[in-house]
Amino acid sequence: MAVGLLSAFLSGLVAFFIARAIARNAASLGLVQNPNERSSHKAPTPSGGGVGIVAGGLVAAVPLALEIAWPTLAVLGLSLVVAAIGFIDDRRHIPAPLRLAAQLIITGILIGIAPLDAVAAQLSQHLPFLLVAALFILAAVYWLNLFNFMDGIDGLAASQAAFMLIAAALIAATSNGMSTETPLLWWMVGVSGAALGFLLLNWAPAKIFMGDAGSTWLGFIIAALCLWTISLGWLSLWQWLILGALFITDATLTLVRRTLRGENPLKAHRLHAYQHLSRRWGGHGRVTLLYVAVNVVLLLPLAWAAGLLPGVALGATIAAYVPLVAGLLWAGAGEREAVA
């Protein structure tokens, strides 16, 4: 346990200092993000700080890779490809179709090496295995991109990643009575430590943004850990759906409402509920704190209950999403921006 905590602390330090170094050299690296009509910021700000999260996450993975080389090294390799694509996109735009094609290939490889039997059993006993695999590839790509979409105000994506991974580790450790020396458990904590280390620089007002390198890497790692922990019987698919419910609901409601109006779903915008709230409240900090509070007060207990009482897992998932749909619609998810 002491080694795991030390690894998580070291991951946070690595993430912090690398992000700070990038912030100081952002201009020469071509990583300054200028505000535009679709952004939620008003001043040029360094970006690409998510590289620090990637580095911190890799540091945290060392004990796991030494004990379980496969599939740890494969997952880490795929995640680095995702981060590299995101970093290139941070510096010079990559067309959306090309990014999606690369993500489909990478997540397809992830699904190909993941043991899907336990995941498929939770989804259905009757669907063909190849259909289940295809569904999870699409779901993983969707999650990766929506996590990127939700990285639009200070502190939001980093706090969400930290919450999901710490919550998953707590649920796994307390519900399954596993040894606290389990390396995979501490990698989850270590990645959350990296996110928290970066958060020290990303909290409102942000000194640096995460960028696509960090947001897509975190989305991919969370998807991989979802598959991994389900296959081990640590958490269920329902529990992961609950832990990610706030991001899933905000992004999906916004996408559906924009698509129904005939808008291009790939076009940049600032119509998520969190973006409407940040304009309404005149800042980012309170919105991020609200999302953290909803995660801790509503979603964490429901995810815990879904594990302790598997028979109520579906009901707990519904109980998570119904109030979120109502609340986020009230907050304006997908609404057109008011014209001043």
Image (tube, rainbow, N blue to C red):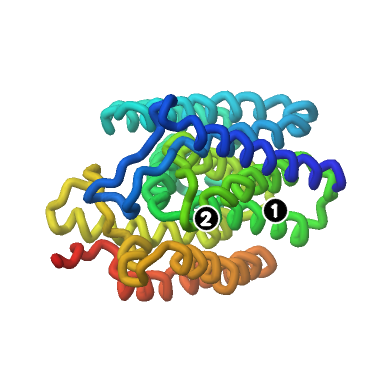
Q: Nearer the viewer, residue 318 or 273?
A: 273
Q: What whole-number distance in Å separates the C-alpha atoms at marks 2 and 1?
A: 24 Å
Looking at the rendering, which quadrant does residue 7 occupy?
top right
Q: Residues within 10 Å of mark 1 (few under 14, many from 20)?
A: many
Q: Position of residue 158 (x, y in %)?
A: 53, 50
Label 2's element?
loop
Residue positioned 56% across, 37% down in the render: 19
Q: Position of residue 26 (x, y in %)?
A: 45, 32
SS of the residue at dot 1? helix
Please tell me whether residue 281 is drawn above or below residue 60 in the rendered image.
below
* Residue 236 spot, x, y in % from top left: 60, 55
In terms of sequence position, does the residue under pointer 2 or pointer 1 come before the other? 1
Residue placed most toward the observer, 257 or 203? 203
Q: Residue at x 50, y 37 (%)?
A: 23
Q: How far across and how far down the image is residue 167, in percent?
A: 65, 58
* Nearest to viewer (mark 2 / mark 1): 2
| Residue 59 in sight here | yes
Say which mark, if any, is on residue 203: 2
Q: Are marks 2 and 1 in contact (CB under 8 Å)?
A: no
Q: Nearer the viewer, residue 97 or 5?
A: 5
Q: Is residue 14 left or right of residue 339?
A: right
Q: Amino acid at mark 2?
A: Trp
Q: Amino acid at mark 1?
A: Ala
Which residue in the structure is indicated by mark 1? 169
